């Protein structure tokens, strides 16, 4: 069972038209809907399950510039500014706190990677730096004995995944957006190369624009429109503890385990090096696109052949819009957590930091991360179809960047001056000969 998410009540209204339909009620879709509603457009958001049912409630809650791909740094800088004022803007607690984030270095290779990243980030004048074991010890008592050096960014922080997107959705509703839950969008109607309507399981919504913020489902949705989005899914597992006195507030990532304090006093703990990629028909289809990423991530990825191969093969077939779609068959993607790896992660943490000895695990879950070949999202208009904006493929780090990414997607709809230059996020990079690849060492 997934994490307990703040409730967004069902709507009683169903509109026959809107300026914009947003598909997906994660942090990206809700942030887009809020920005659009605040700009005065009529917006309907359609979520097939509940708000933040998938990645947006299942993540670690890190909001970070540190170790961010330089292509995303201008957007995360804007996003941190947005997070700082978000509680006030949405009139609710999103859990955002500036706590600092530390990436502990365990090998000479990691030290070299972090130093190389600092060089790449220098033009952006971020306050990240390498710190000594004495400084580590002040932030994480006992940490100085475990690690000699770390990459540390004091202005990074955290927010609560189970609260943030619901709070943003409710604020969007107050600003005039219609937020529909249990309402899958089956497909789009188009006329003369333009979007004209979104067809949902409850009926048709005529519209001029659609934003696809469907997370791990975006690839399938776009394939029905004849658009090729090379996106795969990776399963990552997380656990949370009951409130715990003593451990630090700084969030820490190391090769063996990662943890961050939660607003409820507990800890979210996981192993960022133990992701599982199920082999699916798309793994073969996009093999060439993902080869550079696969070479870089080989050590932290386990390939697995399981039921997803058959499921995705069956789901790939186009379904007429008057028939139930795969989006209705799986209201919430709720994959099983990898309990063995989680146990190992907690054992490592307890061995290194006795202050975690009393940690009592109250829940474990997993999420399917939507990854792109270059680990950078697509936030883009689409040349082939006017009125369509894609905002997806956040590759395991879209929660922190979400509020600004939603604003950028809204800017692309309205034609306002974009909050940052969107060139690096263009959809066409997968077809214009660019050879997108991840930045090494990130
Ligand atoms: C274990 C884990 C740890 C992570 N840690 C971090 C972290 O610490 N920091 C960070 O920044 N990021 C992290 N991430 C990544 C982050 O969670 C995602 O990048 C982000 O939540 C993506 O948001 P989204 O709105 O694009 O997708 P989602 O939250 O997945 O939302 C997409 C929504 O679209 C809906 N949908 C799809 N298709 C349809 C349709 N046809 N009709 C209607 N609805 C539809 C789905 O039901 C879903 O609710 C982590 C992810 C995981 C899984």
Image: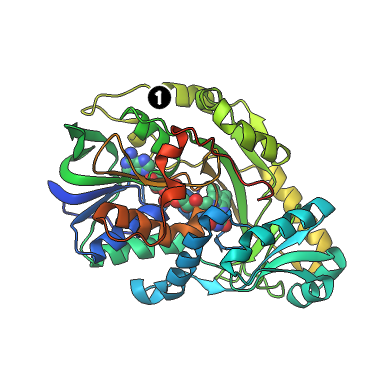
Horizontally, residue 300 falls left or right of residue 48, namely right
- Residue 336 visible? The answer is no
| Residue 243 sits above or below residue 427 on the image | below
Label 1 sits on a secondary structure element that is: loop
Q: Position of residue 42 (x, y in %)?
A: 18, 57
Question: To which residue does mark 1 refer?
Answer: 316
| Residue 127 sits above or below residue 373 on the image | below
The residue lying at 47 percent from left, 44 percent from top is 393
In terms of depth relative to the viewer, which is nearer, 393 or 256? 393
The residue lying at 79 percent from left, 57 percent from top is 111
Few, some or many residues within 10 Å of mark 1 (<14, 14–19, 20+)? some
The residue lying at 33 percent from left, 36 percent from top is 328
| Residue 45 sits above or below residue 303 on the image | below
In terms of depth relative to the viewer, which is nearer, 171 or 425? 425
Q: Position of residue 340 (x, y in %)?
A: 71, 43
Image quadrant assignment for residue 89: bottom left
Q: Position of residue 164 (x, y in %)?
A: 43, 63
């Amino acid at each position: 069972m997934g994490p307990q998410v703040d409730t967004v009540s069902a709507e009683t209204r169903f509109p026959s038209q809107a300026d914009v339909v947003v598909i997906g009620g994660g942090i990206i879709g809700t942030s887009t809907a809020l920005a659009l509603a605040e700009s005065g457009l009529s917006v309907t958001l359609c979520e097939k399950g509940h708000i933040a049912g998938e990645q947006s409630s299942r993540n670690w809650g890190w909001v970070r510039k540190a170790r961010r791909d330089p292509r995303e740094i201008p957007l995360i800088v804007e996003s941190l500014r947005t997070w700082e004022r978000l509680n006030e803007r949405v009139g609710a607690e999103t859990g955002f706190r500036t706590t600092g984030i530390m990436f502990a270095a365990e090998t000479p290779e990691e030290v070299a990677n972090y130093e190389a990243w600092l060089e790449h980030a220098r033009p952006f004048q971020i306050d990240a730096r390498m710190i000594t074991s004495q400084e580590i010890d002040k932030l994480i008592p006992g940490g100085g004995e475990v690690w000699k050096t770390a990459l540390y960014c004091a202005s990074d922080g955290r927010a609560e995944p189970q609260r943030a997107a619901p709070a943003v959705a409710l604020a969007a509703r107050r600003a005039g957006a219609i937020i529909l839950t249990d309402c899958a969008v089956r497909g789009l109607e188009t006329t003369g190369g333009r979007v004209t309507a979104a067809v949902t399981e409850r009926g048709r919504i005529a519209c001029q624009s659609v934003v696809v913020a469907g997370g791990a489902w975006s690839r399938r949705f776009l394939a029905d429109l004849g658009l090729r989005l090379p996106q795969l899914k990776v399963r990552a597992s997380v656990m949370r503890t009951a409130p715990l006195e003593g451990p630090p507030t700084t969030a820490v990532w190391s090769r063996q385990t990662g943890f961050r304090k939660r607003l409820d006093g507990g800890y979210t703990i996981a192993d960022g090096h133990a992701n599982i990629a199920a082999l699916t028909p798309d793994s073969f289809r996009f093999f060439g696109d993902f080869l550079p990423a696969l070479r870089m991530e080989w050590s932290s990825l386990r390939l697995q052949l399981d039921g997803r191969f058959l499921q995705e093969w069956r789901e790939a077939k186009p379904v007429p819009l008057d028939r139930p779609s795969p989006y209705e068959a799986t209201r919430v993607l709720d994959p099983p957590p990898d309990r063995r790896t989680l146990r190992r992660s907690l054992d490592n943490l307890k061995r290194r930091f006795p202050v975690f000895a009393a940690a009592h695990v109250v829940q474990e879950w997993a999420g399917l991360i939507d990854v792109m070949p270059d680990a950078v999202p697509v936030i883009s208009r689409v040349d082939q179809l006017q009125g369509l904006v894609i905002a997806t493929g956040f590759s395991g780090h879209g929660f922190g960047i979400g509020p600004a990414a939603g604003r950028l997607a809204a800017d692309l709809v309205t034609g306002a001056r974009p909050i940052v230059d969107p060139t690096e996020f263009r959809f066409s990079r997968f077809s214009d000969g660019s050879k997108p690849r991840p930045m090494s060492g990130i």
